Every structure is written in C-alpha cells, then in structure tokens.
Amino acid sequence: MEIGILVYSGLFLAEDAGLLRILAKRARAGVRVRIILGDPDSSHVAARGIEEGIGDDVMAARVRNALTLYRPLRNVEGIEIRLHRTVLYNSIYRADDDLMVNLHAYGTRAPEAPVIYMTRTEDGSAATTYLDSFERVWTSANPSTCAL
C-alpha cells in the first residue's frame, strides 16, 4: 500500500493537522508515504509563483512553510519527503492505484485548475502515465533537509 503526493508546495495539505495524523498513522501501519515538494531554491518554483501571479519569492516561502509543518512526520518510519527541481505539469495525489491529478493551467492557481480522478488498471491506462511520471520525479528528487 502506498500514498504519494507530488506538488510544488502542498501547503494546504501540510496545514491540515488531521491529515498529518492520518499520514503518520498509515505509515505506522505499514503504508509507504512519499511526499515530493518543489525545491524552494529551484527556478521552476520561482517561475510557478510568477505564473500564478503571487511572485517568485512567495511560492518558495510556501514550500518552506510546508516543510516546517511537515516536521512532525520527519521521524515517522515509512514517510519520506523529497525535493524536486522539475517543471511540474500537474500535481499528483496517489493512494495505491487511485489517483487525483490536478491539471496545471498556465496563469491559473492550482486550486482553480481541474482535478481528474483515475484508477490504474491491469491492462494499462492513463493512470499508469501519471504513476510513471511520479516515479521519474521521485527518482530525480533529493531527500529533504530544508527546515526539517
């Protein structure tokens, strides 16, 4: 079983104390939890902030804030947080084979962009494309030490 989150800042998730407790509880029960945030020092994070109209430094600050809020998860076995330096075409929220994909649209804040739901099937599906994308970003991401 696995939970995976791929976002630039994911601040709305990190601010939810109930969700943090759920992630910790699930990890303690043997679920692998992987969180990938944008590296706050990445030019892609700055660019996303500009594109969303909040400024190049605000998105980086949101990532740093999220990392600070994720501190309670730092010592929970089964939870790993990494930082990526990729262009993020979408945010991915995974629970096993079920996905919610937040489709990024240029100049649109993530909460205003569409979210689609999909499930991976044995015969292959669009969900597999997004799961493979998640794995590529995970492999290239660095373990987080910022603010943790």
Image: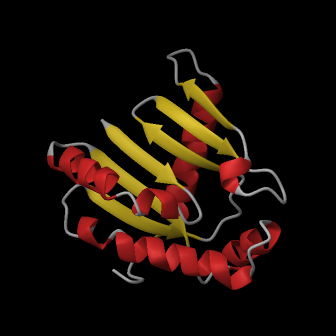
Where, by quadrant of the figure, is residue 26 drawn? top left
* Quarter of the figure that contains the C terminus: bottom left
Q: Is residue 44 visible?
A: yes
Which residue shows up at 15% across the image and 42% down it? 29
Q: Is residue 143 visible?
A: no
| 31 displayed left or right of 80 | left
| 113 displayed left or right of 24 | right
Q: Residue 49 in the image: x percent, y percent?
A: 73, 72
Viewer-side residue, 60 vs 31: 60
Q: Residue 68 in the image: x percent, y percent?
A: 38, 77
Which residue shows up at 62% across the image and 22% down it? 125
Residue furthest top as drawn: 123
Q: Residue 66 in the image: x percent, y percent?
A: 45, 71
| 123 displayed left or right of 53 | left
Where, by quadrant of the figure, is residue 70 drawn? bottom left
The count of marks equals: 0
Question: Does residue 44 sit above or below 3 in this rendering?
Answer: below
| 81 displayed left or right of 75 | right
